[in-house]
Image: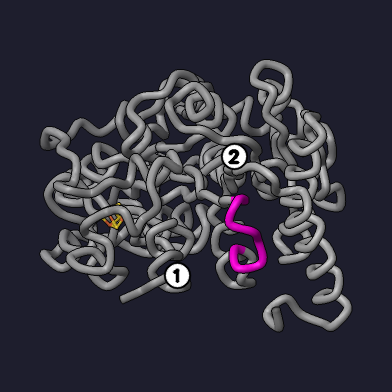
Amino acid sequence: MQQLGTEETQRAAAFLAGEIRKMATRPVRLMEVCGTHTVAIFRAGIRQLLPPAVELVSGPGCPVCVTANDFLDTAIAYSRLPGCMIATFGDMLRVPGSSTSLMAAKSAGADVRIVYSPLDALMLAKENRSRQVIFLAVGFETTAPAIAATVQAAEQSGVDNFFVLTAHKLVPPALRFLVESRCRVDGFLLPGHVSSIIGEGPYRFLTQEYDIPAVIAGFEPLAILRAVYTLVLQLHHGECRLENQYTAVVPPAGNPVAQQVLAQVYETVSSRWRGLGVLPASGLTLTSRYRRFDARQQIPVAVEPMRENSGCRCGEVLLGAITPRQCSLFGGPCTPESPVGACMVSVEGTCAAWYKYGTGR
Ligand code: SF4
């Protein structure tokens, strides 16, 4: 319990855990959707505080993990084109595509640069006007507004060699897919960061159409435990509500400025999720106004046919259908040092979290 913090926090946690134990008279499966929650749960040892009847499973909330092979394959193909430079967040380098990774392409001579923000990528474009700089635009509603604003900045500054390769994903359509799939989830711990942009409204279908309670929660251990307690309490009393317990960061209507930028620059499209397939209205692409920054539209490239990584069960892990340990490659052929699938790459990936904090090897 020490990892929970002060004595006062530990007492509060012990109280909540005790109340959860009293109410846990039947098995419940709760899903934390966000990779940051997954790591926080492991780090604080929250699973160990819960009775066996309360199972926490991880969902499709790690942006690197849900990015499909065909996106990686396209990025790798671009990296090999003469004159192209890839700018990307570091995590994407080691994600395996169908047959190789950006890291391998970089080692073979491709110009792949790690950036820490989309503005860094725009700067690279300004500094390398003879090159076509392609920024890999991955992530959920949280990261998309900053990338959208960067596209607008590129337009305003007249930069014509900056492009984005989009693979943005939207969380609510993935949750709808999840609850309609074979996977049982009795309650959702909703992502704080994504919610700060989209607000409460897009999750209402969970309670209204599917009778599944949901709580928007912060990332402190006690906040997570309180959210679990609230979900168990609701289930115990046969109730079903959407609660926002992260009001300091998540206004009910979200962030209207970010939403406006998103609406100006992006439109909703079907998108392929790793292991889940193509989900309708679950991704973002540039609107026609900004199409000249769309790498796919502006720079033709031949991409190898997509193949899934042999033996990798990331799709089932992302659905909460299996735990990473149930994958036969976990901890053997697949480790953070040598990942077979995307869920083992990012520190927020479910398999990587299980490896680091769970069983390891
Ligand atoms: Fe894929 Fe590795 Fe996770 Fe198995 S352990 S599901 S191979 S990432």
Which residue in the rendered view is the most extreme toward the front?
25
Chosen colour scheme? one colour
Name the residue: 45% across, 65% down: 353
Instruction: Report if the beta carbon of the residue with label 1 is closer than 8 angstroms to ligand 1.
Output: no
| Numbered mark located on residue 141 in the image | 2
User: Would residue 55 be found to the left or right of residue 226 on screen?
Assistant: left
Name the residue: 28% across, 51% down: 131
Q: Earlier in the sequence, mark 2 or mark 1?
A: 2
Residue 136, x across and y down, in percent: 38, 47
Q: Which SS class for mark 2?
A: loop
| Magenta segment boundaries in residue numbering | 47-54
Image-quarter location of ligand 1: bottom left
The N terminus: image quadrant: bottom right
Query: Which kind of residue does numbered mark 2 sit on?
Result: Glu
Query: Which kind of residue does numbered mark 1 sit on?
Result: Gly
Specify whether residue 192 is in view. Answer: yes
Name the residue: 86% across, 52% down: 248
Name the residue: 51% across, 33% down: 184
Q: Residues within 10 Å of mark 1 (few under 14, many from 20)?
A: some
- Kindly identify which residue carries mark 1: 358
Depth check: give the residue in front, 206 or 158: 206
The C terminus: image quadrant: bottom left
Q: Residue 277: say if magenta.
A: no
